[in-house]
Amino acid sequence: MYKKLTLIFLLIPLIGKSQSASTTYWQQRVEYEMDIDMNVKTNQFTGDQKLTYYNNSPDTLNKVFYHLYFNAFQPGSMMDVRSLNIEDPDRRVGDRISKLSDEEIGYQHIKSLKQNGKDVTYKIEGTILSVRLNKPILPGEKVTFKMEFEAQVPLQVRRSGRDSSEGIRYSMSQWYPKMAEYDELGWHTDPYIGREFHGVWGDFDVKITIDPTYTIGATGYLQNPDKIGHGYEKEGTEVTTSDKPLTWNFKAEKVHDFVWAADPDYTHTTAQVPNGPVLHFIYQENSENKDAWERLPEYMVKAMQFVSENFGKYPYEKYSFIHGGDGGMEYPMATLISGDRNLNSLLGTAVHEMLHSWYQGLLATNESLYPWMDEGFTSYASSVTMQYLMDPNSDADPHTNSYRAYYMMAESGKEEPLTTHADHYHSNRSYSINSYAKGAVFLHQLSYVVGQETLMKGMKRYYHDWRFKHPTSSDFIRTIEKVSDLQLDWYLEKFVYTTDQIDYGIKSVVGEGDATYVTLEKVGEMMMPIDLFIEYEDGSTEIYYIPLRVMLGEKDVEDKTAARITESPWPWTYPTYTLKVNSKTSAIKKIEIDRTQRMADIDRSNNSLDLKKATKAYEDTTK
Ligand SMILES: [Zn+2]
């Protein structure tokens, strides 16, 4: 009896422990080995894919799913019809998919698929391949899938494709059957309609056999540089050339995707970042873009150093800027950007895409669910980086354009909440403004709530805690809560989950003896802490800081040039708040809510009061 009891008692803490362990973070893992044979005459290729899949989830899997992105580039595909029906189609897509001929469409055909050596049954619907497993994959188990496939590269429409308008032969993104991600929310099997990606973390070993005149830029490290040449060989190495196809072998570890591009007319240069990666520049040179591409390396070396210092160190030893099909798009260890641009445009795009190495590449948020965390955070960090590169002594706010776009959307009445799935936004415009602009405002405004230094500390902590993982918006805000020692769930709930707006105003100013009573008013639905600036006739400034009660704390002093007086917190259910300024009204020149304008207040007309101009309305009422 005694022994039995001991055993039961021993079991209790064990059960408790395993329960809490099951709620901790886990993620799946993949190892791809691929062998590709590219026919540059037919634009078709064959592929052998061996995929080792690790089920690190606590669940038994009976099915798995792959993305077949190239199937989107066919008339009648969901991507085609979406573009034909949305109110503001992306001009790069428009009706172009509907007009592709049989030789111009893209496809991925599965020739065979085996799980641990045995054929499995599968079904293809549009861009999703569903596989019913012979044997379920138990938690902690790994299986091997072997696949043979054939594919045709579509004519360049969006992101991937052949023969772009600038003459790039192959932009190869989303080019292979790619395992969908499975996480605590289940499978992510969004059909590809032209926008977002989400992949499983793992390793890639890719062999590409192609015509020997083609230069390839890709994710990962080239394993046989001295045999390949094309600018990858060690300096001084004699590379033997032949007219037989070359097999390029790239390996990448700890990434969630693999991109490559190939063209016979690429120029290839490199630049070493001190204490950082080697940057590769792979572009098709012409008289118009030559100057911009030649000057790009000096800026990108500086940019890589700046970003590594401020947002976390770039962990790989290589990054490639590759002249690709259209616009700019981020991939692990590389970007594809269209290249016929002037220096400013090329630089802006290159900085933005490189910053995606942090916000999406390393901090691999699910783009469909949190497009504002990859585009918005990238926009925020690239505005800061561009200001450092172009105008380092400026104290201008680099985020004003993001605020302007957000205000425009908020006033239009067509704003959708940031929680909207990227594919489900009613218009491309509403997706873009939310993801890029409101996402950047989210961060800059958060610096107003927690303090600029604390936010930057938080961005680094976020990088260290969540790189090589799939963070969510809650993971991010939790990180900022840790570094700021403030409660911030309200900020996420209001600014992300709803379209509630911020509007605070100065309601009244009343003088009474040697004091002045300022009454503030919460007009908008969203609550915020208040920095109230008081500028005196003698030129001095004070900041009356009113934290929100729900923050359960205060931000650190930010502006060391002005004295800060911390007031009692504002419980947000109170529509007004009155504070006492220890000064005669006549000594006050100006009162202003949030002089830094980081708070996205949709009506700033009631934010400041020039007392000299407004003497009538705000004169002392008690003599
Ligand atoms: Zn972007």
Image (tube, rainbow, N blue to C red):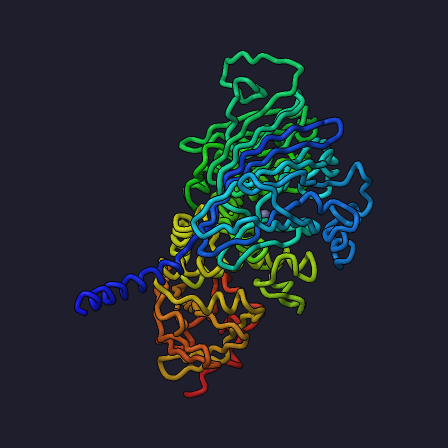
- Residue 496 higher or lower than 326, as above or below: below
Q: Which one is in front, 195 or 43?
A: 43
**Residue depicted at 31% across the width and 61% down the height:** 17
**439 to the left or right of 544:** right
- In depth, the one of 34 and 290 nearer the eye is 34
Q: Nearer the viewer, residue 487 or 261?
A: 261
Q: Give x and y (percent) for residue 104.
A: 78, 38
Residue shown at 58%/42% (left/top)? 330
Look at 55% across and 47% down and name the residue there.
199
Residue 559 appears in view: no
Residue 42 location, quadrant: top right
- Asked if 339 appears above or below 210 in the picture, the reply is below
| Visible residue check, residue 224 | yes
Q: Residue 454 vs residue 85: left or right?
A: left
Question: Where's the C terminus, which quadrant?
Answer: bottom left
Q: Residue furthest front?
A: 1
Please identify the quadrant where the N terminus is shown. Answer: bottom left
Q: Is residue 116 found left or right of 559 in the rendered image?
A: right
Q: Relative to 578, does residue 23 appear above or below in the rendering?
A: above
Picture coordinates of residue 362 (x, y %)?
A: 48, 45
Q: Nearer the viewer, residue 243 or 564?
A: 243
Q: How many marks?
A: 0
User: Residue 448 sits in which quadrant?
Assistant: bottom left
Point out the residue furthest to the bottom here.
Answer: 622
Q: Position of residue 247 (x, y in %)?
A: 59, 23
Q: Position of residue 298 (x, y in %)?
A: 52, 31
